[in-house]
Image (tube, grey):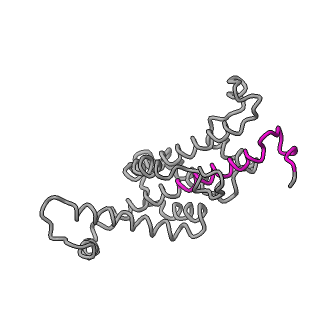
């Protein structure tokens, strides 16, 4: 993280995320995609609460275990109630959790495509205009990967240019649903990336303000 920066995306190792979590998420099953995104956000919240613990108890395992929650719901609610995260981030994560809860009730019959509208809402809450831009970028990323694979294929191919492949894909309607599903997973992974960075940003900013102080009321006004 750049200490002189206040941009939320500087509070996550984007290259590391894109090379690890991103690829795993987009190649997961429908269920796995949602569960993994939820798990990553749950872990992020818990790690930030550990960081913001008062110095007096950071090394006291017994007190830490009593104060820290293992519940995603409790950590999320506490993060919002204590004003560590803004309402839009709270809403976005809750919408993701609501999709995750559907899995518990439909273990054998869960389709990510049925939650397209809610994923779009998550994107919009995560970043203004996100519903449009995340969806657009996600589709472009997936199409670009398909094109790259076909153009770099060692076997003889009738495709020579990007445009030829796009024209071919447009005529194959049987490909469209699978392309849209993969793009939906990419969109969800991008939203998760931004949500992680926003959580980290707001907690780190709060930690900076609390540095050397025991309570919020002791923060000196500037």
Residue drawn at point x = 71 percent, y = 50 percent: 205
Residue 154's image quarter?
bottom left
Asked whether 218 falls inside the magenta stretch, the response is yes
Q: Position of residue 94 (x, y in %)?
A: 61, 53
Q: What span is colored magenta in the figure?
A: 192-220
Residue 60's image quarter?
top right
Residue 175's image quarter?
bottom left
Give the vertical position of 73 relative to 67 (above or below). Answer: below
Residue 177 relative to residue 119: left or right:
left
Q: How many marks?
A: 0
Identity of the residue furthest to the front in this view: 4
Considering depth in this image, is 96 or 162 the residue closer to the camera?
A: 162
Looking at the rendered image, the quarter that the C terminus falls into is bottom right
Residue drawn at point x = 71 percent, y = 29 percent: 58
Residue 60 relative to residue 167: left or right:
right
Q: Position of residue 100 (x, y in %)?
A: 52, 49
Considering depth in this image, is 212 or 190 the residue closer to the camera?
A: 212
Main SS of residues in magenta: helix
Residue 85 relative to residue 197: left or right:
right
């Amino acid at each position: 993280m750049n200490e002189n920066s206040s941009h939320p995306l500087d509070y996550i190792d984007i290259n590391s995320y894109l090379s690890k979590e991103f690829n795993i998420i987009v190649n997961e099953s429908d269920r796995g995609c949602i569960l993994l995104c939820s798990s990553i956000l749950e872990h992020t919240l818990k790690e930030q609460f550990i960081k913001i613990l008062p110095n007096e108890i950071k090394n006291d395992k017994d007190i830490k275990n009593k104060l820290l929650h293992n519940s995603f719901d409790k950590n999320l609610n506490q993060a919002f109630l204590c004003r560590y995260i803004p309402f839009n981030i709270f809403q976005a994560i809750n919408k993701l959790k609501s999709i995750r809860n559907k899995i518990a009730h439909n273990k054998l019959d869960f389709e990510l495509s049925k939650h397209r509208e809610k994923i779009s809402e998550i994107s919009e809450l995560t970043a203004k205009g996100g519903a449009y831009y995340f969806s657009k970028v996600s589709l472009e990323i997936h199409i670009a990967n398909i094109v790259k694979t076909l153009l770099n294929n060692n076997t003889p191919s009738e495709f020579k240019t990007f445009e030829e492949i796009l024209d071919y894909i447009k005529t194959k309607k049987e490909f469209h649903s699978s392309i849209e599903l993969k793009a939906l997973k990419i969109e969800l992974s991008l939203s998760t990336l931004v949500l992680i960075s926003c959580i980290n940003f707001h907690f780190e900013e709060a930690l900076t303000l609390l540095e050397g102080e025991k309570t919020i009321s002791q923060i000196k006004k500037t």
